[in-house]
Amino acid sequence: MGQIKNKIGLYSTQFYCRLLVLYPASFRREFGPHMAQLFGDLCQDALGRRGLPGLIGVWWRALRDAAVTVPTEHFANWRRQMQRRETIFVLLGALFLLFSFSFAAVNVLKYSLGFSNLWDPFAPLSAETTPWLVRQVFDAFILGGPALALALFLLPRLHLRLDWSGDEVLTVVIRKGAPWSLVLMGLCLVVGGVFVLYFLAENWACLIGQQLAC
């Protein structure tokens, strides 16, 4: 009987070790052997004291703990990666913002303020002779640029915390950044607002139903 319990405990520990792959690799390297050893000791102790019901209780506690710690550790690992790559995210966001901001500035100066002789570097991309797919991609980058840039600026500062035991399961905290980052985020909102206003002004007749063909 003792050998059967030992085999059951061994198989349980081996299966638990396979489940540890759910955790991030860095977490497994640091805590995996200790967790496997502790789980094996708990299984042997539970089997010796209460038999199969005791083993089921150990598995229930282990799975309940994994349901909380696995997503929590992945969130923590994701946050560390975002913080290490913050410079890359900021540079990419700045490029998207600069692209959209330049388009908005050129259009406001040339078509709204009357600087008709101003060179428009975006004209070849939006011309009727430009392939349809190229124009669609260009429009997507222009219109989505501020939102994408804002997301890139915010991603490294997001802190997600998962807690199944509290009233708030998911808590999202935005880490405080430097003043220049707030300026960039403000520019994203300004440029995005300009595009929204331009869209409303250009399609106002359609939106209020005064024009049927839009």
Image (spheres, grey):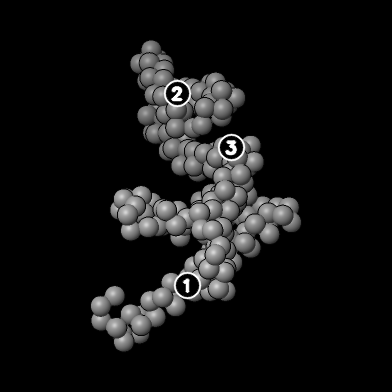
> Quick one: SS at disc 3?
helix
Badge 3 amino acid: Gln
Q: Residue furthest front?
A: 117
Q: Residue 179: x, y in percent?
A: 74, 56
Q: Earlier in the sequence, mark 3 or mark 2?
A: 2
**Residue 14 % position (x, y):** 41, 20
- 68 vs 22, nearest the viewer: 22
Judged by depth in the image, the label closer to the viewer, 3 or 1, is 1
The circle on residue 81 is 3
Q: Does the image show residue 161? A: no
Q: Is residue 35 left or right of residue 126?
A: right
Up-down: is 54 above or below 113?
above
Q: Which mark is residue 17?
A: 2
Q: CA distance from mark 3 to mark 1?
A: 37 Å
Q: Secondary structure at mark 1?
A: helix
Which numbered tag is attached to residue 198? 1
Residue ID at (53%, 68%): 116
